[in-house]
Amino acid sequence: MTAKIINGRQIADEYLRRIKQNVAKLSTPAIFAAILVGDDPASKSYVSAKKLACNKAGIVPKIIELPKTIDEPKLLHIINDLNQDKNISGILIQLPLPKQINTQTIIEAIDPNKDIDGFHPINIGLLAQKHPRFRPCTPYGIMELLKHTGIHLAGKDVIVIGASLIVGLPMTLELLMKDCTVTTCHAETKNLSNKIKQADIVIAAIGQPNYIKGKWIKENAIVIDVGINRLPDGTLTGDVDFESAKEKASWITPVPGGVGPMTVAMLLQNALLAAALHLT
Ligand code: GUN
């Protein structure tokens, strides 16, 4: 069987249209600040994608570009100003940050009510307690993509490969909220391929091109590929060997055009929520 493709771009565009309708109902514009430190090409392209999606959703991004040499006190000062600024309802800091800056300190400095990335300990804690407010965008988007397949999630065996704050950890919490049985794997995990073979749903966030082979995928499993890896010839590829995996899976996300656009759409969903919260 050849898998059906989960068209993340199309699903994200529908989301952005709906967000735009809701933004139009707000009494003030939805404005969020996106901080980009340094000139990492991947970070720059992610911020550009966010800016483009803002145009589609009627949300106003305030992009703040800072030099990679900025020190932590200066960055904290900027965040504090944004926390106080009544015109700004959401804040995000593009990660990763340069080495001289403690990422955890920065994440904790953002007002949790403006934390549209959902990485603040309060927002992760609320998700862990199954009462989420701002949900980290990639896992949030993946939950929407899974909804699109029509799968009933309760009781499904899911393997999440990766345990980062951005994807793997909140992904595990999202799936627990839907009563899945979740196995979270990381660099120290043993017998990964055997674990993948048991899973009804595979979520790959490893950062290694084409790492997951089709022969490891259970017949009819759903495969969600979070990886965005650039090969030496410039092409983008995921963490899953798409060609072999699509012969085993029932549904699969492409790279590009799968998880990426949904991550951005969910950021704007969070920006809409933040704008609404600031009017109350
Ligand atoms: N870097 C990679 N993914 C993300 C994300 O979702 N949010 C932020 N702020 N930085 C990232």
Image (tube, rainbow, N blue to C red):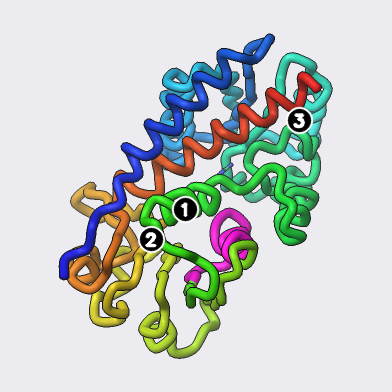
The mark that comes first in sequence, 2 or 1, is 1
Mark 1 in CB contact with mark 3 (< 8 angstroms): no
- Real-space Cα separation, disc 1 to disc 3, in angstroms: 29 Å
Q: Which residue is mark 3?
A: 79
Q: Which residue is mark 2?
A: 224
Q: Residues within 10 Å of mark 3 (few under 14, many from 20)?
A: many
Magenta stretch encompasses residue 167:
yes
| Residue 137 is inside the magenta segment | no
The region drawn magenta spans 160-175
Q: Nearer the viewer, residue 253 or 21?
A: 21
- Please name the amino acid that badge 1 sits on: Ile
Q: Is residue 149 left or right of residue 109?
A: left
Q: Residue furthest top?
A: 27
Q: Position of residue 86 (x, y in %)?
A: 79, 16
Q: Secondary structure at mark 1?
A: helix
Instruction: Kindly state the secondary structure of the residue where label 2 is placed.
Output: strand
Name the amino acid, label 3.
Ile
Taking 275 as reference, is 202 left or right? left
